[in-house]
Amino acid sequence: MINCIVFDMDDTLYDEQDYYKSGFATVSRIIAKDFELADRKVFDCLWQIFNCGNRTNTFDAAAEKLGVVLDAGYIQKLVGIFRSHQPDINLPSDSKAVLENLKGRYKLGLITDGYLPAQQLKVKALGIEKYFDSIIYTETLGRENWKPAPAGFKKLLTELDLPADQCVYIGDNLEKDFLSPNQMGFKTIRVIRKGRIHFGPAPSAQAGPSYEVSSITEVINLLREIDAV
């Protein structure tokens, strides 16, 4: 019997690209002001670089394209601003409907990787804290315990006092989301959002999900099928 549904957040409950748009918009205003550039020009440059797959040194690449010099200290300041900005993101109506449908029928958990306070600010902006019986920010366990490490899953099971075989984990990222819950005995579901930003393959057969859906709304019927098995 399934008694607990555990969600990933980024690119599972909402499109993570919306968070990056929000962060780049905030940073663009800072760069534009400091270097007397147009906000839109800076944003378009950052967004183009990001969408071309540069997710690690976006600011350096943008500086080169914009013809400005951003030293290491300035870039570190931008990174801090990005991670601490108030994100302009919203919970999609389909995700909201699913959470409201499941709340009260199952215990609900959230396990999310990423830097604090960025992840906490996302939870607040999305307005989802009220839905969950347990929220695990893996950053609080140490960066070495970000997924695919099992520590976050173990902590959630302890907090909710449930065995793994009564839990379903719903995520999106083949590279890191499913290996540990699979090994621990969770059923796993991958939501393939159209606007997702992660496309890497699973590192092994053991890291793939038990099920895949193209819309989070399909989860409700799928859970009934899993529970009936």
Image (cartoon, grey):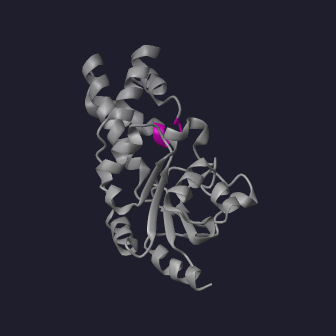
Q: Residue at x 25, y 21 (%)?
A: 33
Magenta: predominant secondary structure element?
loop
Rendered position, 4 above or below 43: below
Q: Quadrant of residue 183?
A: bottom right
Q: What x and y, as percent, mark residue 46? A: 40, 34
Q: Quadrant of residue 99?
A: bottom left
**Which span is picked out in magenta?**
50-55
Name of the residue lying farthest toward the right: 205
Q: In the displayed structure, does residue 207 sit left or right of residue 199?
A: right
Residue in front for this viewpoint, 17 or 111: 111
Q: Residue at x 39, y 34 (%)?
A: 83
Tell me if I can see residue 71 in this picture.
Answer: no
The question of residue 177 being in magenta is answered with no
Quarter placement of the N terminus: bottom right
Q: What x and y, as percent, mark residue 197? A: 50, 50
Name of the residue lying farthest toward the bottom: 228
Q: What x and y, as percent, mark residue 173? A: 57, 54
Q: Residue at x 66, y 54 (%)?
A: 201
Q: In the displayed structure, does residue 86 sit left or right of residue 170?
A: left
Rendered position, 95 above or below 34: below
Q: What x and y, as percent, mark residue 10? A: 45, 52
Residue in front for this viewpoint, 119 or 133: 133
